[in-house]
Image (cartoon, rainbow, N blue to C red):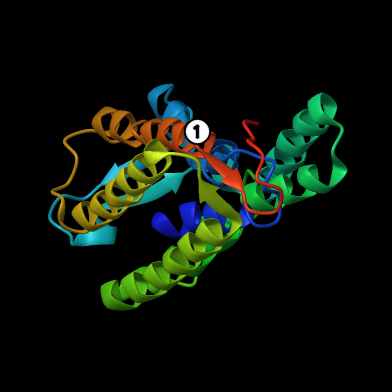
Amino acid sequence: MFIGHFAIGLGAKKFAPEVSLGTFFIAVQFLDLLWPTLLLLNVEHVAIHPKLESSKIVEFTDYPISHSLLLAVVWSLLFSGVYWLFKRDFKVAIILAFCVLSHWLLDLTVHFPDLPLYPGKSPLLGLGLWKSTVGTIIIEGTIFIIGIILYLKATTTKNKTGIIVFYILIALLIFTHVSSLFAPAPASTNQLAWAAQFQWVFILLAYWADRNRSATTDGTKHTR
């Protein structure tokens, strides 16, 4: 799951228009922002199989800190708790908690059985939608389109930057998603981990685009 996660961030804007799209992107990708850093630190691990196809190239062998259900719940509570401490907005904190947890729930639909419930000797879950590339594209694409529609209904542009940067962001997300389906296997775990850090570009673009758009509910500028 890739653009499906970002779709949740786009759609969440409708329910909390005062929160920046960049913040939503951090929330929905929090587990995957944590994961490459843990790979680089050799805390979590993957196996690379260059002779296999598409989603089977990378085998997630050990990632209980970033991708177990128990820790996903913990990260959700910590993320929303920090937001609440600074903003004192319980409703938004709950929405952000759901955004963080949504990552694990969406991963559950596509992953092969490799998602642990908790660190240690845990059952591994995954519904395996990745077995069907076409099915994955259709479902993720549908979720992504819905997310874009909800975001555009929740915001209006303040200037040309709000239009241009937003559609650059969308184009980059689509390009990255499509190219990942046909990309060769990474040469090493470190290469994979550094490539995954590229998603910070999407977050920065989301903050930039959102600063140049306003919520349709009141027409004011929001920068959180």
Above or below 33: residue 61: below
In which quadrant of the rendered image does the N terminus lie?
bottom left
Q: Residues within 10 Å of mark 1 (few under 14, many from 20)?
A: many
Horizontal and vertical percent for residue 120? 62, 44
Q: Is residue 113 visible?
A: no
Which is nearer the eye, 112 or 120?
112
Q: Is residue 196 visible?
A: yes
Residue 139 left/right relative to 137: right
Above or below 45: residue 130: below
Which is nearer the eye, 26 or 12?
12
Above or below 30: residue 137: below
**Is label 1 in a helix, a strand or a loop?**
helix
- Please identify the quarter of the rendering in which residue 125 is found: bottom right
Horizontal and vertical percent for residue 29? 52, 43
Horizontal and vertical percent for residue 130? 35, 68
Residue at coordinates 51% horizontally, 58% vertically from top-left? 152
Horizontal and vertical percent for residue 164? 33, 42
Residue at coordinates 70% horizontally, 56% vertically from top-left? 15
Amino acid residing under circle 1: Tyr
From the image, tell me which residue sits under label 1: 207
Residue 168 left/right relative to 98: left
Residue at coordinates 21% horizontally, 50% vertically from top-left? 49
Which is nearer the eye, 51 or 133?
133
